[in-house]
Image (tube, rainbow, N blue to C red):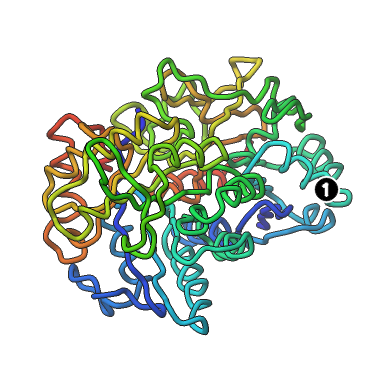
Amino acid sequence: MNVAIIDYGSGNLHSAAKAFERAAADNAVAAKIAVVSDADDLRKADRIVLPGVGAFRDCRDGLEAVAGMREALEQEIIRRGKPFLGICVGMQLMAERGLEHGEAQGLGWIAGDVVAIEPRDKSYKIPHMGWNTLEALKRHTLLEGIPTGTEGRHAYFVHSFHLRAGNRDDVIAETDHGGAVTAMVGRDNLVGVQFHPEKSQALGLALIANFLRWMP
Amino acid sequence: MLKVRIIPCLDVKDGRVVKGVNFVDLRDAGDPVEAAKAYDAAGADELCFLDITASHENRAIIFDVVSRTAEACFMPLTVGGGVREIGDIRKLLLAGADKVSINTAAVLDRAFVGRAAEKFGSQCIVVAIDAKSVAPGRWEIFTHGGRRPTGIDAVEFAREVVALGAGEILLTSMDRDGTGQGFDVALTRAIADAVTVPVIASGGVGTLDHLVEGVRDGGAAAVLAASIFHFGTYTIGEAKRHMASHALPMRMN
């Protein structure tokens, strides 16, 4: 199985690739992990991961700047149904619009906008930075075997904006930071996580392993 | 609920941990990567490397250290020390650092913080503030390990760098650093109340109660300590259990 992690100039992907390699090895999944920056290489992949750090618009522009990448993503993921995992801003890009530093169009795969987190009072610091638990709203293969709820495992978050889904059914998990914050969205062969599985120790490696075995 | 973070900080010089790390069965206590792996396994919430390499020709060693750490540890890593230019930040992020801390360069040129945040995003820009008490309720920024005063008010400076895009403040009391007498709680509280971003309290931790005070009384979102962990006085687990027993939200698994 070939897994492509898309490199579009949004930060270091070496540690993300290492986390996928570790998850595959620990779970005896035969997977070749490749960091790709070319639309043709993306087409060879069986599973596709879109990371992203920084601002929504910068990431969107970075993705658009790679010749043919946007079209390849639409074809492989939406039309051919390959399993897709968006991470952090890569998850936010799945939305219709981002509202960070003005309005910017997203990929439009998940109905909704990316908006500022607005906690109920000032004691909740922004960015939402650190370890938090997940509240699962529904069952999902990627959360299999991962304890959720207030006594569950923790995921590492660092973000100031989150995806406010237009369709509540697309929200798989939330976390709490002075109010509900979207932690995980998805439908069909698409899933996106606001937190960083590649930085989330046990929970992260388990979620990545689940993604590698997922048959949507 | 977001948990309070415990962050062990390793001073790294010429690619080696200064003074070493005296716990568990490290094959090489001076290897930052070995120490990082041990803290990863011990449940540290983040790691911090402070590069104190003086000689210019050895400045590049830290990139290799960061890169090897990021390959072995799937946890967040902040790296600081000697960050002067946008290119330094880029190299550290590309090596695998999640956050980069800026100290003197921010004092010399506040706009540098703005340029860095614009380029890489606020989430990875930490501003490290070294402050000393100069009058009751007033703290001044000092550079050069606390030897050189700048005349800049620490609370005002914190507000400014956050407005420019700093995503986190690493606050060290130069009065307390290395004393083991506890954080400067009043300083921590003054900064935490002045900014919207998380504040990491640093400098002076000698007991586990000090960690509690930094969060409960100082309003810090995270606590950074070096010697109490490196010398094996307390484990990360003991620190977490102690803080949890004082009703602070900790990540225990």
Q: Where, by quadrant of the figure, is residue A176 drawn?
A: top left
* Residue B40 locus on image (x, y percent): 33, 58
Task: Depth check: give the residue in front, A178 or A109.
Answer: A178
Work out which residue is located at the far bottom of the displayed protein and give it. B57
Q: Quadrant of the N terminus of chain B?
A: top left
Helix, strand or loop under label 1: helix
Tell me if I can see residue A110 in this picture: yes
Task: Depth check: give the residue in front, B180 or B158.
Answer: B158
User: Residue at 69% of width from left, 25% of height from top?
Assistant: A99
Task: Determine whether, in the image, residue A135 is placed left or right of residue A11.
Answer: left
Where is mark 1, residue-wise? A69
Task: Depth check: give the residue in front, A35 or B141.
Answer: B141
* Residue A157 locus on image (x, y percent): 47, 39
On screen, residue B181 above or below A79: below
* Residue B241 locus on image (x, y percent): 15, 42
Mark 1: few, some, or many residues within 10 Å (few <14, many ≥20)? Answer: many
Q: Where, by quadrant of the figure, is residue A123 drawn?
A: top left
Tell me if I can see residue A195 in this picture: no
On screen, residue B27 above or below A198: below
User: Residue at 67% of width from left, 35% of height from top?
Assistant: A189
Task: Depth check: give the residue in front, B68 or B125.
Answer: B125
On screen, residue B93 above or below A94: below
The amino acid sitting under disc 1 is Met
Q: Quadrant of the C terminus of chain B?
A: top left
The chain holding disc 1 is A
On screen, residue B132 above or below A108: below
Task: Determine whether, in the image, residue B29 is placed left or right of residue A216.
Answer: left
